Structure formats: C-alpha cells, structure tokens
Amino acid sequence: MTDMRLGLAALCFFSALLNYDCTPPTCYSRALSLSKEIMTLLDKIHTFRLTKVCAEGLPVIHIDVHNACITNKLRDFLYVVLNHPDPNCREKPRMVLLKQKIQNLYNIITRVCYRDLVFFTDDCEAIDTGRSSPNLAEDRLQVLQEDR
C-alpha cells in the first residue's frame, strides 16, 4: 500500500513538473502565434496544387502584429477571401480555414486585445512587400540634432 502511495505521489509530482511551464496565452502571444499560422497556411495555399488557382486571386500580405496598418490590411484581405471570384475556392477546406483564422486574428486585434497590443511602426508598404522601409523622419531628426 505504501509503494502505491509513493508511486502515485511521484506521478503527481512529475505531472506537475511537466505542466509547470504551461501558462495561458496572452493576447499578444495568441496574436503572434495566429499570425504565424496564417502565414504558414498561406504558403501551403500558394504551393498546394488544388489551391494554387485560388491563391492567384489573393493579394500579397505579410502579417506583422506590430504594424499599425495590420487592422486595415486584414480587413481588406478578409473581404477578398470572403468574396473570392471563384465560388469553388470559397468552399475549399484550406480557404475556409484561412478565412476563420483571419477573422479570429482580426477580432483579437480589434476587440479582444484592443489597446493591449503595441504598434512599433505604421509602415503599410511593409505589409504589402514584406520589407520595412526606414523611417526617414527619424533620420532627418538625427541630422538636425547633429547640426546643432
């Protein structure tokens, strides 16, 4: 009987150790993970033979939850996915999943985590191209400060 209690105590102890690092997701961590899931899914849609045709109708998007332009770009992207010109594309499982994930991310950013996320940039072009352009105003400010 003592061996059974000792074994049960050890099992509980090791179970607690495994769950020690498990923390509930924050708005920020959920937005980050969902944005990565969407980008991975978009890559699959662009390369999978059954959805390549559907991907041609989608605009290019590079999701960055730190960019203030993300809400407008997600809203526009969601509109295109919901109103895809090919009705067959709207019904494909990966496209339906993409629609759901984008809706979730949009809701997280605009409702659930409203004012919890910090935007570091407002470079709308970076969401379209994937490349962030330098902020010229900051460079000019530095030059002005050096002239003094």
Image (tube, helix red, strand yellow):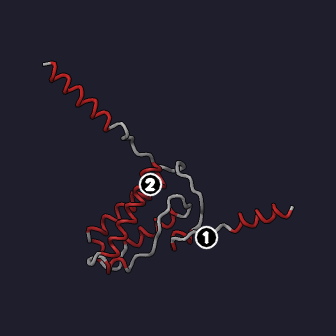
Q: From this viewpoint, which residue is outermost toward the top? A: 2
Q: Residue 12: percent from the left, percent from the top?
A: 25, 30
Q: Along the horizontal axis of the image, is 49 left or right of 114? A: left
Q: Along the horizontal axis of the image, is 77 left or right of 115? A: left
Closer to the chain start, of discs 2 and 1, is 2
> What residue did someone put label 1 on?
133
| Quarter of the image where the C terminus is located | bottom right
Which sits in the foreground, 147 or 54?
147
In this rendering, which labeled residue sits more in front, label 2 or label 1? 1
Which sits in the foreground, 144 or 64?
144
> What residue did someone put label 2 on?
31
Q: Along the horizontal axis of the image, is 23 left or right of 127? A: left
In this view of the protein, can residue 88 be seen by the observer? no
> Which residue: 56% across, 52% down?
118
Q: Cα distance, mark 2 to mark 1?
A: 23 Å
Asked where in the image residue 84 lies, by quadrant, the reply is bottom left
The type of residue carrying mark 2 is: Ala
Q: From this viewpoint, which residue is outermost toward the left? A: 1
Q: Residue 116: percent from the left, percent from the top?
A: 52, 48
In this view of the protein, can residue 39 be seen by the observer? yes
